[in-house]
Amino acid sequence: MDNKQQKSELMNVLSVIDNACTKFFDNLTTEQKEEIGSLEKWSAKDMLFHLAFWGDHFNTQITNAKKGEKVPQAGDYTDQVNDGVLFKHLHHQFEEAREAFERSLKASIEILKRYSADELNEKEFYEYLNGRTILNRALGTFGWHIGFHISDFYQKEGQTKKAAALQETFTEKLRGFPSWEANAIYNLACFYAQTDEKGKAITHLKTAFITRPDFIEWAKQDSDLDPLRKESDFIALFDTNQE
């Protein structure tokens, strides 16, 4: 894909995400909306405040960079990140979480629309991205991150088919981008490993390793792949790549 196609596809991915989130909201039960979560199991509300937090972080970083102002880093939020966000909003209402998330995502989409296709794909456009493109960062923050959390919620609620369908949809979208192809396939392999689809997990790992051989070392210690450790086909992946 050239830069214009990548921008068009990014907008398409954001639309798919928006639709998936609306579907997620509409299918939640009253009990799920009212649930108070914990560190061990986030509620739907907790997840949305978490995603809104990181969406706002993305928006603040890129807005400040454009203005030439100080760009906040994740380490600046030591009293808020993840667990802190959960406790801060523990007794807030679901609709507050939904509003915060939708506001954040809408703002992100409007920000990204204003960048040209070439700007989105320029590796050195903003220093804080450390060589990554705006497009690459956006796909991680909104494509992978949102998809992961909604899928994880489905999985923990025993809705494995819904979780798998969402993972597969987002993987298909993300793998179309050169910078995300291997990551998307590898992440899907991790999902399959965690849901006991061992054959699918190993097949996808093999594909990911071909594109990104550097993933091999990471896979050796990735806890998401622990369910595969004793599988002969999994072990063979590393034997083959050591030859």
Image (spheres, rainbow, N blue to C red):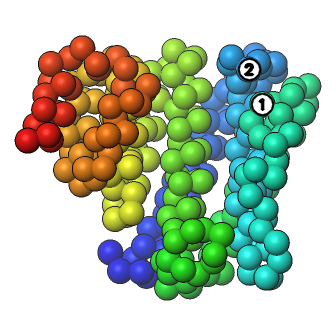
Residue 141 in the image, given as x and y percentages of width and height? 59, 54
- Image point 54% across, 80% down: which residue? 124
Query: Nearest the camera: 124 or 22?
Result: 124
Q: Is residue 31 above or below residue 189?
A: above
Q: Quadrant of residue 222?
A: top left
- Which of the labelled discs sits on residue 39, or is there none? 2
Residue 109 in the image, given as x and y percentages of width and height? 66, 66
Q: Is residue 143 left or right of residue 188?
A: right
Residue 8 in the image, given as x and y percentages of width and height? 46, 73
SS class, disc 1: helix
Q: Which residue is mark 1?
A: 83
User: Dot 1: few (<14), some (14–19), or many (≥20) neighbours within 10 Å?
Assistant: some
Quarter of the picture containing the N terminus is: bottom left
SS class, disc 2: loop
Query: Nearest the camera: 221 or 207?
Result: 221
Residue 68 in the image, given as x and y percentages of width and height? 79, 82
- Image point 52% across, 32% down: which residue? 151
Asked whether residue 172 appears in the rendered view, the answer is no
- Image point 86% across, 39% down: which residue? 79
Q: Amino acid at mark 2?
A: Leu
Give the mark count: 2
Q: Is residue 70 left or right of residue 21?
A: right
Quarter of the picture containing the C terminus is: top left
Q: How far, Cα to Cα, is label 1 from label 2?
A: 7 Å
Asked whether residue 147 appears in the rendered view, the answer is yes
Q: Is residue 205 above or below residue 152?
A: below
User: Dot 2: few (<14), some (14–19), or many (≥20) neighbours within 10 Å?
Assistant: few
Q: Are marks 1 and 2 in contact (CB under 8 Å)?
A: yes
Q: Is residue 114 left or right of residue 156?
A: right
Q: Is residue 219 above or below residue 28?
A: below
Q: Is residue 83 above or below residue 144?
A: above
Query: Nearest the camera: 169 or 223?
Result: 223
